[in-house]
Image (cartoon, grey):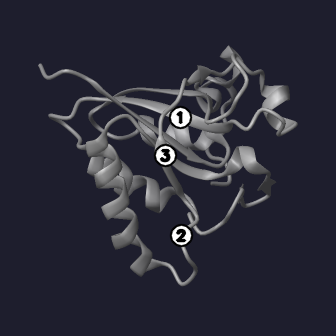
Amino acid sequence: MSAMEKATFAAGCFWGVEASFRAIPGVADAICGYIGGHKDNPTYEEVCRTDTGHAEAVEVTFDPAQVSFAQLVDHFWHMHNPTQKDRQGPDVGRQYRSAIFTHSDEQARIAAESKEKAQANFAQPIATEIVPASTFWKAEEYHQRYFEKNGSAHCAI
């Protein structure tokens, strides 16, 4: 068994992002949370006020022997509109930005190359940020596996 790796993505409302990544074979876990801000252990209400600088994001734990980081990034480009800056659909604000938070130089390289390649599929410039991962703060329990718990099928991502 290979060692698990982490990948962190922000693509709007984290409920749909989490559900989408959970469906990929090789993904062992996906956790909703907050990253990229300046406040320790932020709450959902604080992040929604946009004064913490955090993005709603999903930390993905995956087995690289089953699914590569490059495959996860490719999935990321198809699950949301990466040309929208600080929003996804009806969700507007810096907390809904599109971002890849990288955990290594290799992830940063793969993400940057993938972004350049993905640009050919969009008429507008991709607004996705690619930045080193900072501390990931797990969101409140009621956000975890939200669709499973509440019977919802999808979210506007």
Label 1: state its secondary structure: strand
Q: Quadrant of residue 35?
A: top right
Give the amino acid at mark 3.
Answer: Val
User: Residue 104: x percent and y percent?
Assistant: 32, 37
Check disc 1 and report the residue beneath it.
58
Q: Is residue 49 above or below residue 124?
A: above
Is residue 73 found left or right of 56 in the rendered image?
left
The answer for how far apart the CA atoms under marks 1 and 2 are is 20 Å
Is residue 8 found left or right of 63 in the rendered image?
right
Label 2: state its secondary structure: loop
1 or 2: tag closer to the N-terminus = 1
Q: Is residue 60 above or below residue 77?
A: above
Give the amino acid at mark 1.
Answer: Val
User: Residue 134: x percent and y percent?
Assistant: 52, 29
- How dense is the environment of label 2, judged by Cα within 10 Å: few (below 14), some, or many (20 and up)? many
- How dense is the environment of label 1, judged by Cα within 10 Å: few (below 14), some, or many (20 and up)? many
Which corner quadrant holds the C terminus?
bottom right
Residue at image x 20%, y 35%? 64
Give the amino acid at mark 2.
Answer: Ile
Which is more foreground, mark 1 or mark 2? 2
